Amino acid sequence: MNRVVRGSDGREWTIRANLEWSNPIVVDEFEHDVNGGSTPAIVVGAALASLVVVFIAWTPAEVIIPSWLIAVIVLAILFFPIRWVLHRPWTLTASTPGDADENPPETWVGVVRGFIEVRTEVSQVARHIELYAEPDMNGRLQPTE
């Protein structure tokens, strides 16, 4: 996700949002970022898949399985993987090459979780750049050196 914005001082800013497949360590979230890895998810997924297989294997031939039950089982199996993908962290970067006159190059970086929150944050950062010539100092993006 890329967006180009012109600041109120005339500089051109590029706002990028990149999906992260691994959890970046953020200083504020460091204590809460400890998890057991992917092993618990694999174990729970395998248990759920084996229960579905047993449910299907033990069903007598005379039983008619309604289509809504199959849809519920498929949704139950897909719920957590879809939730996992939708709540992945995104790295937001707002950068400008500066200009030759007086403004040096700047880069601001931050992390946002969730696809909808990323779109909202990109819009807020773009609006703040248009009005004040830089991202909000009190927002999620922070300047880097």
Image (cartoon, rainbow, N blue to C red):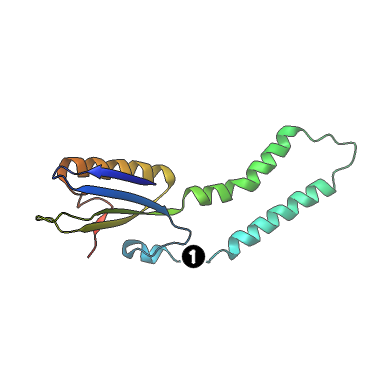
Quadrant of the drawing holding the C terminus: bottom left
Left or right side of 18 for 106? left
Q: Disc 1 on helix, strand or loop?
A: loop
Relative to 141, residue 34 above or below: below
**Amino acid of disc 1:** Asn
Question: In this orientation, which residue lies closer to the viewer: 43 or 101?
Answer: 101
Q: Residue at x 44, y 57 (%)?
A: 20
Q: Residue at x 57, y 51 (%)?
A: 81
Q: Which residue is mark 1?
A: 35
Q: How many marks?
A: 1
Left or right side of 70 for 38? left
Relative to 107, residue 135 above or below: above
- Quadrant assignment, res 9: top left
- Quadrant assignment, res 126: top left
Tell me where residue 104 appears, x and y as whole percent.
15, 59
Q: Residue furthest left?
A: 102
Q: Residue at x 74, y 52 (%)?
A: 51
Badge 1 local density, few (<14 within 10 Å), some, or many (20+)? Answer: few
Tell me where residue 47 appears, x and y as whole percent.
69, 57
Tell me where residue 79 appears, x and y as whole percent.
59, 46
Q: Residue at x 69, y 42 (%)?
A: 73
